[in-house]
Image (tube, coloured by chain):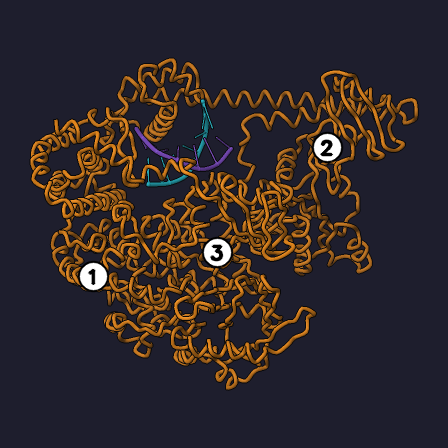
Chain colours: A orange, B cyan, C purple
Amino acid sequence: MFRNVKHFSDISLFVSCDLNLWRVEGCHGRCVEHTCLRRRPRWRRRIFRLPILAHASKLINIVFVSSCVTITFLPMVGVEGNDEGMCEESGVEKSSSSLSSPKQIADPVVYKLVRVEGNGRLVPATDDEVMEVEDFLVDETVELPVVPDAGNVRCISNDESSSGKPQKENSEGLSHSENTEADAKLNARLEYIEMLQKVKQEERLHLACGSPDHSSSFMNVDIQCSDQHDKLPAIDEKLQSEIHLQDIGPPLSLSPDGSHINESGRIGECSKQPPDGPIESGSSACVICTSSKPDVNTLKGEICLDNLSIRELHELFRATFGRETTVKDKLWLKRRITMGLTNSCDVSTTTFTIIDNKLVKKGKDDSIQNADGMLTEGSDGEAKNHEYETSPTSHSSQMENHHTVSGKRLGNSSVELDCGSEDLHTDQRAAKRVRKPTKRYIEELSEVESKDCSPKVSSPVKNAGQGQTSVKSCRPLGNVPLNEKATVNRLDPLGNVTNVPSNERTYVTRFDSLGGSGVQVPYVSRVRRSRPRKNIMALMKFDMSVMGVTAKLVKEAFSVHSSLPESEHADKVLKTRSASEQMKSQLWAYVFEFDNAWFTAEPEKDKRHSVMGTIEPDKNMGMKQTDSSEDNSDDGSAQIPTAKGGMRRKHHRAWTLGEVTKLVEGVSKCGTGRWSEIKRLSFASYSYRTSVDLKDKWRNLLKASFAQTPPDEGINSRKHASVPIPASILLKVRQLAEMRAQLQRRHRRQLSHVAMGIIERIKEIEAEMARTQKNKATEYHLGQLKAKIAKLRTQLLEPPKGSSGGGDGFEVTKFGHGRVALIGFPSVGKSTLLTMLTGTHSEAASYEFTTLTCIPGIIHYNDTKIQLLDLPGIIEGASEGKGRGRQVIAVAKSSDIVLMVLDGSKSEGHRQILTKELEAVGLRLNKKPPQIYFKKKKTGGISFNSTLTLTHVDEKLCYQILHEYKIHNAELLFREDATVDDLIDVIEGNRKYMKCVYVYNKIDVIGIDDVDKLARQPNSVVISCNLKLNFDRLLAKMWEEMGLVRVYTKPQGQQPDFGDPVVLSADRGGCSVGDFCNHIHRSLVKEVKYVLVWGTSARHYPQHCGLGHVLNDEDVVQIVKKKDKEGEGRGRFKSHSTDPARISDRVKKAPLKQ
DNA sequence: ATTAGGG
DNA sequence: CCCTAAT
């Protein structure tokens, strides 16, 4: 039976089965899987989106891991009609027709469904299966049609919400008249997301222009949005399913007809989503590429993601992955989202997705969206924008323009290269130290339960406290008051607009929905950053009940702050915004909570009020004080009740001048880096200054001193600092810093002198060896000399390690899952190779010896990222430091494998020279560690043993060599016939054994016979950069040699995440389950009860394994954690529990009552 | 304990 | 300036 499926670019198919695990072989696309529990719990709907380009000619196997069933899609020479008939849902047809562009229809690809038996036979699906599928299809047709490709329609749900429609009409009446309702709905949803962006954008504009004339025109939009906001959640639920970026992708599908929302949304979107280049070869390599123009790109990218608040990120996350996240780590979220997008890039490639650039491009090509197309036409589009939009948006239109341009470029020109380089740039630039997600990530991992389904009503506080809670989670609360909410919303915007620039609106709506209480929201657009917090803290200290008046108090508090001169905030607006947002959410958490308490505890009301009365004045006073100067009152109280997530800051103490001076003195005495010492000496009496604080302050001082020195007058102009730091101190700071730097430099120079000396000696010894004739008699002597050299060499190597590892920026930060170094003589084509493989532009080609530093590039292969380093050419004598040789080799040492690039047209000698140079620094290529057991002992002399007769060394020689190392007590056991060098290696113990692939380049200029000969050598690959030959072989070889193990994680009760594997490597870290856990998070390993493993390393599926189990490539692992025990490692959450809070309440209460 | 990123 | 992860 040939069922399914798809045309054009992807396969979309419903499969019903109980199999939980599957993966797709033979393609790099990501499959989007979808489970629909609502209607047919047993059946899972799977939507496979595969880049057809890459695989049109191949089989695509979808392997159901748990039962080894393979379903294969064969390309079918299908006829369209047939195809259509087959197509399950009308939805598909619809979409295709509506989108129909000549091109699409032109080349449909049809697949048929078969089954692959164990023996490889292809068996048509059985009737039963077909029936099932059919049933499923029919059934689901209505429910969710899926959809494929065309980008425009992403997912359709059959429950059309009426809400979508009006919206659509309003905003995009013209261009999309033919869209289906579903579209509209989808759009609506998308819009919501965009809206978030928009708000940001607006803010920015607003600030930038300073001329807030967005009046009525914006209002409309805003109102719409707020509506949307409400409705969306509902929609959400219905669509529950849909995952992916597609949701995010909205910008595309929206008609860009110039509605403000769309516009800004788009922009936001773009940056968020790195454009990705089509993958020509079908490799999934390209990931995050941004446009070909680095500046524009990175810039945009940064802006967008960076400016998102956590809440927004959460939205995004949900949209991307279809589930909630509790992680609050911004960085993590960002990366996660990016990755998610990234991973789906492949898919998008074919489907038109979201990616802005892409979108634009596609739109143009296919003329799917008229409006879009027009927009993309550059000036045309811009003009249009202007027409539609009021002045503030000019900015955005401009951006769009850029975008378009880049999009075009991307699309038209060699995409792959561009992508690569971009990718590289972004990736590499983000070097730094990367923080792992906190423990919360782990929770999420094993937290099967999506909270969104059943948020706890019982803990409103918690929800509220998080502040960032997504709309969804709030919904339960709001359920009852839903109607109420709606009305409130409508009203609010109006009131809002008058008071505050429309950009505040989002918050407003959120708050409303948050409590569902319909409380008036204080519109405070500007709140000073840290102050309000104190107020809250103050509030918190009192009995919760006191909060009865909270609203009032809050208002007062705010009013005080909001009266501050605007100028003060001008520069920090963005920051302030977010701060205020947070603030507000927290406040409202309180209000809400209080309200609850209030209702439940009516009787006590009076009492509280009275209490309040006494308290209030105090508070106000406190606030005022705080405002005017530093507040010591707050600081005194060490621990702020950390009731709701968030305010745990203990105290906030400004540095006084005296302290700063002391600090500077301390530094001048002890130097930087020994902070605890400084603390002991100078800050003994200041218990609240920790060494970290000192260090921090110093950092700031440094920054300040360097920043302000150039313009000397500027020093006094620092109005923000509470304690202006006198120029003299800054000066001193700078001097100290410079002194430090000089010291270090001198130190380094000394080191290099030492190194030179060592090199000299090595040379002498080598010369002596050369002089010595080789025979039995001199054997011992030679052995000794060898040992000496080895010793000296290690000395040579060690200092650099010990000292400030950084060096002169030669070293490139590690990135990706593996690292491969290109080594070779100058101009053998290393740079070219790098360019070919990664698309990085390494200044190659144009000049010959150009590569002077280490140039990184990223290869995307098999879902992993491999860092490829292009190193300067090595020349003979590199090991002694010639031509940066030492650094080069050091980098090589830090990589996982070495690609030795050789010129096929030159003699074999090069290879030997290189090998020798590498050996000189302790690199052993393609060798196994010698089988010699060696152990130092305290006593007992040297025990010498061997399991076989030794031909190269004898006991006496060993003694001598050991003697050379001043080792007199040791145990030595030869398990193989080793040489002197092997012995020395073992004794030194610091050798690095690396795999090496010899790459012969330029095979196009030599005869086929020679090529054949070269290719037959072990570990060799012949390639030609000029002709682009054999790269795939090279990559495959590389992959094989690296022995990376991809492990996919499978959250409990969910499908494995085949999008982003955890990559382990036997060389580094190992491949056991324990290593895997460590890789995710250190603490995880302690909580593991057992793991379930599917894959080649498991004997049966799934297999229960312990931490020791060794994983194979492409295994799927599910971690099952121990039941958490009370009190262990849960400190963080304890603070969230209600107990402590109550206790503290009581403590506070007591004094008041008395 | 120090270093460093980030809010 | 503070918090907290990474080292």
- The residue beneath circle 2 is A920
| Label 1: how many Cα within 10 Å (few below 14, some 14–19, many 20+) | some
Residue at the spot 69% in from the left edge and 44% down from the top edge: A824
Residue A482, disc: 1
Image location of residue A741, percent across then percent down: 47, 23
Q: Where the N terminus of chain A falls, by quadrant?
A: bottom right
Secondary element at tag 3 = loop
Image location of residue A942, percent across then percent down: 80, 19
Q: Where the C terminus of chain A falls, by quadrant?
A: top left
In the displayed structure, does residue A1063 sit left or right of residue A642? right
Q: Are marks 3 and 1 on the same chain?
A: yes
- The residue beneath circle 3 is A289
User: Toward the viewer: A365 or A873?
Assistant: A365
The answer for how far apart the CA atoms under marks 3 and 1 are is 43 Å
Residue type at the position of mark 3: Cys
Q: Earlier in the sequence, mark 3 or mark 1?
A: 3
Secondary element at tag 1 = helix
A707 lies above or below A895:
above
Give the image quarter of residue A938.
top right
Q: Earlier in the sequence, mark 3 or mark 2?
A: 3
| Label 2: how many Cα within 10 Å (few below 14, some 14–19, many 20+) | some
A1006 lies above or below A367:
above
Which chain letter goes with mark 3? A
Image location of residue A865, percent across then percent down: 56, 51
The answer for how far apart the CA atoms under marks 3 and 2 are is 40 Å
Q: Is residue A107 visible?
A: no
